[in-house]
């Protein structure tokens, strides 16, 4: 079974660090932020680090 984490406010601070830490442990991360653009940018940062991530508003 795939592990998935939904992180709200993941585009900065504790939210981003939580997303990163769970991502390196093998979770797929669903990133949310106030705008789709910020969510996508954050997901791309995580993806560039080898983490499976998806941005959603």
Image (cartoon, rainbow, N blue to C red):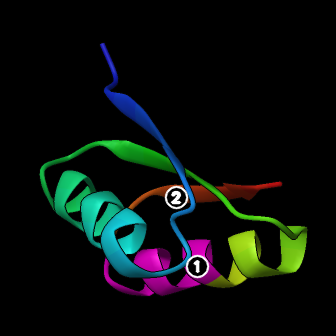
Residue reaching furthest left?
A: 25
Question: Which x, y percent locates residue 25?
Answer: 12, 50
Give the residue at x 31% y 27%.
Answer: 3
Give the residue at x 83% y 54%.
Answer: 57
Query: For the stretch drawn in magenta, what is the main secondary structure?
Result: helix
Question: Which x, y percent locates residue 23?
Answer: 27, 57
Position of 47 compared to 56: left or right? Answer: left
Magenta stretch, residue numbers: 42-50
**Residue 53 tag number:** 2
Residue 39: image quadrant is bottom right
Give the residue at x 44% y 57%.
Answer: 52
Question: Which x, y percent locates residue 35?
Answer: 87, 70
User: According to the image, label 1 marks what residue?
Assistant: 42
Question: Which x, y percent locates residue 51?
Answer: 35, 65
Gap between marks 2 and 1 measured at Cα: 9 Å
Q: Nearer the viewer, residue 33 or 21?
A: 33
């Amino acid at each position: 079974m795939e592990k998935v984490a939904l992180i709200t406010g993941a585009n900065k601070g504790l939210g981003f660090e939580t997303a990163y830490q769970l991502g390196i442990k093998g979770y797929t991360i669903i990133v949310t932020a106030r705008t789709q653009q910020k969510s996508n940018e954050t997901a791309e940062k995580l993806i560039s680090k080898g983490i499976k991530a998806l941005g959603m508003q």
